[in-house]
Image: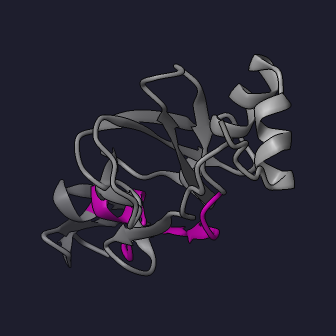
Amino acid sequence: MVPLPVTLPLFRLLCLGRDQLHSLTSSSPPLVKPSISMDPVGEVSWGQELRITCSTAAELLGETFFLQMISGSFRKTQISASRAATFTISKVNFDHDGSYQCHYEKTVSVSGQTFTSPLSDLLNVTGKKNKIPFLLKMYLQSPMQCGTMGGSEQIRDGEVQQVGDY
């Protein structure tokens, strides 16, 4: 029997222990940095619905996406059967102003190990108040009387009407 030539890297691989071989074969898969976007784009009016989407080009099935606010305790989790997850904030208010990032986790079924993607770029959310302040809106929707000397004015449907003598 003629011995087969063994190259040095192959020889080292054959001499590795089981634990060392497992660590070589179960290293973290290269996870792609996700992208983050919002709808509507730009400023969001308070009370409006906001959808933030985290997506990746990686092949994912049933993986977990995470959305977090950088300065605050806001954090949402969503399992998705596709390459994206959309997080909905039903009524935006000043608490939602800030920067957001997302990432996803992939679990390797054979080993049960979970790997985390890099964080997405920052997404800045800026809420804006409605153009008509709340109190003015209330005044315009219901009649209100403002007393003056000898008469009064009534605001109804956005118009000022004089009532009584001045």
Camera-side residue: 52 or 83?
Answer: 83
Q: Position of residue 11 (x, y in %)?
A: 82, 42
View extreme (left): residue: 157
The segment highlighted magenta reads 119-139
User: Is residue 103 a member of the stretch shown in magenta?
Assistant: no
Horizontal side of residue 30 vs 88, given as left or right: right
Q: Position of residue 83 (x, y in %)?
A: 30, 55
Identified at 42% across, 52% down, the residue is 92
Quadrant in which the C terminus is drawn: bottom left
Identified at 62% across, 42% down, the residue is 116
Camera-side residue: 146 or 28?
Answer: 28
Q: Position of residue 16 (x, y in %)?
A: 83, 29
Horizontal side of residue 76 vs 130, given as left or right: right
- Place residue 45 in its image quadrant: bottom left
Identified at 74% across, 30% down, the residue is 21
**In this view, 14 is above or below 100:** above
User: Is residue 132 a member of the stretch shown in magenta?
Assistant: yes
Coloured how?
Answer: one colour
Camera-side residue: 77 or 165?
Answer: 77
**In this view, 118 is above or below 89:** below
Tell how many labels: 0
Camera-side residue: 5 or 66?
Answer: 5
Quadrant in which the N terminus is drawn: top right
**In this view, 12 is above or below 143:** above
View extreme (front): residue: 1
